[in-house]
Amino acid sequence: MAGHHVHTEGNAVPSVDGTELGDILDRLADLGDPDIDLIVTAFRNLAHRRHTITTTQVLAVALTGDPDALDVTAAAALLTARLFNADTNPALRTLPFDQQEEARQHGKTTAHELTDPDLRTPAAEANAALDPRKEVPAVKCLTDEQRKELSKKVDKANKQSQNRPK
């Protein structure tokens, strides 16, 4: 390994403890929600796993690098919008209608901004930097209409799936 700098003993994957990521995961774990705990565990597992260049690229796309915003970041944004919508979160139905509408609008704005394909550019460029020998095709972004159509197809497929929880 001449010429390569080893950052940790034995080139081990360093812990996220004491890092910005570790601090965020600790804060999320402190919420005490069992489903958030699953997310925290998954992120810790992904951070501590030894990756190949290929798995690094695949995970980067899955987390926040999909040019069409079909990734974990978009899923979190759309879930946030769902939580702030009284049509999909019955807990909000106890609030006055104007409060429900304000929450729904802010949730919609959150989802719109966090699913913006332009947010994926840095991750896509980082991915391309991992394999400079290959020509990187131009990023094809979906229009809002194409995204809606794709969403409808996914919803239809999910409703027809036998493997989805009811």
Image (spheres, grey):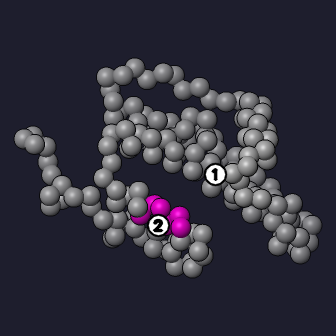
Q: Look at discs 1 and 2 and give the one toward the viewer.
A: 2
Q: Which residue corresponds to the image point at 67% horizontal and 30% vertical from the top-left?
A: 142
Is residue 6 left or right of 90 when viewed as pictured?
Answer: left
Mark 2: amino acid: Thr
Mark 1 or mark 2: which comes first in sequence? 2
Residue 111 can be seen in this image: yes
Q: Position of residue 103 (x, y in %)?
A: 79, 63
Image quarter (top left, top right, bottom left or bottom right) of the C terminus = bottom right
Q: Nearest the camera: 117 or 42?
A: 42
Q: Which residue corresponds to the image point at 22% horizontal and 58% vertical from the top-left?
A: 12
Q: Position of residue 44 (x, y in %)?
A: 41, 63
Q: Are marks 1 and 2 in contact (CB under 8 Å)?
A: no
- Residue carrying label 1: 75
Q: Position of residue 134 (x, y in %)?
A: 36, 22
Q: Which residue corresponds to the image point at 39% horizontal and 43% vertical from the top-left?
A: 55
Q: CA distance from mark 1 to mark 2?
A: 18 Å
| Residue range corresponding to the magenta coloring | 38-44
Splitting the image into 4 quarters, where does residue 107 fall? bottom right
Helix, strand, or loop for circle 2? helix
For residue 116, above or below residue 79: above
For residue 112, above or below residue 46: above
Few, some or many residues within 10 Å of mark 2 (<14, 14–19, 20+) = some
Task: Residue at the far front: name it.
Answer: 162
Q: Main secondary structure of the magenta part?
A: helix
Image quarter (top left, top right, bottom left or bottom right) of the N terminus = top left
Q: Position of residue 51 (x, y in %)?
A: 33, 48
- Residue carrying label 2: 41
Q: Which residue corresponds to the image point at 26% horizontal and 58% vertical from the top-left?
A: 13
Mark 1: amino acid: Ala
For residue 55, above or below residue 143: below
